[in-house]
Image: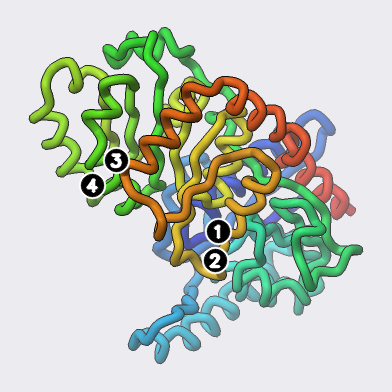
Amino acid sequence: MKVVFTGGGTGGHVSPNIAVISELKKIAQKKDIDLDVLYIGRLFGIEKSMVRREGIRYMGVFSGKFRRYWDWRHLTDPFLVLLGFLQSFIILSFYRPNVIFAKGGFVTVPVGIAGWILRIPLIIHESDAVLGLSNRILLRFASRVALGFPVDLYTGISVEKAFFAGNPVREEIKEFELDKKGLCEKYGLDKQRPLLLILGGSQGAQRINELIDSILEKLLQTYTVVHSVGEKGAAHFKERRARMFEKYKNNYIAFSFIRDEMGDFINNADLIISRSGANAIAEIVSAHKPSILIPFPHASADHQNKNASFLQQEGIASVLEERHLNAFKLLEEIDYLVENKKVREKMVENMGDVFREDSAKKIVEKILEFNK
C-alpha cells in the first residue's frame, strides 16, 4: 500500500502527520501490509528536517502562501503554486498512491488538487474548531474529512464525508520517561512544590512572556516554573535567571523550545499555561492536565479563540482573554486553580467525555479503507 502525506508551514501541521505515520506503520506491520510512505512538503520548509529526522522519505515542491496583508510576494506566489501543482502532478503520476492524507498548510493545496485530477482519494484533517484556508479550498476535492473537534461544531461540511478523529499526539508525549521525582532530581528542583509549565510554541508567546516576567519572583515563592520562552525571549530570560537570588534560581528553568523532554514536563506538570492552538490542546488533554489557555487574538480565522471557547464550555480549561488580562489576574487564576484540587479534577474528568484518545488509530482505520 502506498500512502502520501502532506502538510507544512508550521510544526503544528507536521507533528500530527508524524504521529499518524508512526501508528500506520505499527498497524501495517500487525496486518502484514507492505507499506510505502512518501511525504510531500515544501522545498525549504520546517517539515523537511522534521520528517527526515524520522527516517521518512521526503520530496519537496514549490508552494505559495496566502497572506492577509500586502506583500510583494503576492506577485510571485501564483507562479509558485502553479509550479508546485506541476511538480505534485508528476510525483503522484509516477508514485500512484492509494490515498493522500493532507494535514494543513498551503503546500497541501497543489498536492491535493493534483491528486484529485489523477483520481487519487484525498483525506483532509482539520485540527482546529474552524476550517483553515487550505482545507476550505480542498473540501470539495476530499473523499473524507477528519475533524479535530466534534462534527456538530462545524458548518458547511457534508456529514457523509466528515468524521470525528480528534488530534493525533506524538508518541513521546504519551510515552514519557521520568516521573516528577526523577525530573526534579535531574534539574535540581523541589519536588514538593507544584510545577507550572508555561508554553508558547516554537516561537514563544510574547504577551505571555511579558506577564510571567512581571510576576516571576512571586510565582517562585510558591511554585517551580518551567518556561518555554521562544528563540526571541531566550536571552532575556537567561539573563533574568542569572540575576535571581539562589532560592528563586533553583526553581526556574527557561528553554527556548522544549523538544525531546516535552512528554516529561507535560505529564509531570500540576498546571499548564498555554496558547490554544489545536496541537497544544491535544497534548494537554492527552496528558489529562488542567490548564489556563490564553488564545492568540490574531490567529487566522480566530481559531484559537474558537478552540478555547469550546474547551471552556465543556469545563475542560480556564480561558483568559489576552486583551482583558493583566499579571495580577493571571497570578490570581494560577493560585485559585492550584489551591482548588476539586476544580482541577473536574477539568480532567470532563476531558474523557469530549476528546478521543485513539485519534491516530481512528485516522489510520480510514486510510486503510483505501487499501485496494
In contact (CB < 8 Å): disc 1 and disc 3: no
Location of residue 181 with respect to 237 vertically, above or below:
above
How many other residues sit within 10 Å of disc 2, few (<14), some (14-19) or many (≥20)?
A: some
Which quadrant holds the C terminus?
bottom right
Residue 337 drawn at (x, y percent): 50, 29
Residue 106 drawn at (x, y percent): 54, 70
In contact (CB < 8 Å): disc 4 and disc 2: no
Query: Circle 2 sits on which residue?
Result: 302
- For marks 1 and 3, the one nearer the N-term is 3
Amino acid type, residue under disc 4 in the picture: Gly
Identify the element where label 1 is drawn. Answer: helix
Q: Residue at x 53, y 47 (%)?
A: 319
How many other residues sit within 10 Å of disc 3, few (<14), some (14-19) or many (≥20)?
A: some
Left or right for 179, reference 149: left
Q: Quadrant of residue 296?
A: bottom left
Query: Circle 1 sits on which residue?
Result: 305
- For marks 2 and 3, the one nearer the N-term is 3
Whole-angstrom CA distance, mark 3 to mark 4, is 12 Å
Left or right for 138, reference 300: right
Q: Residue at x 39, y 46 (%)?
A: 200
In contact (CB < 8 Å): disc 2 and disc 1: yes
Location of residue 217 with respect to 327 vertically, above or below:
above
Query: Circle 4 sits on which residue?
Result: 233
Q: Residue at x 66, y 28 (%)?
A: 346
Whole-angstrom CA distance, mark 4 to mark 2, is 25 Å
Query: Circle 3 sits on which residue?
Result: 212
Whole-angstrom CA distance, mark 1 to mark 4, is 24 Å
Q: Quadrant of residue 332?
A: top left
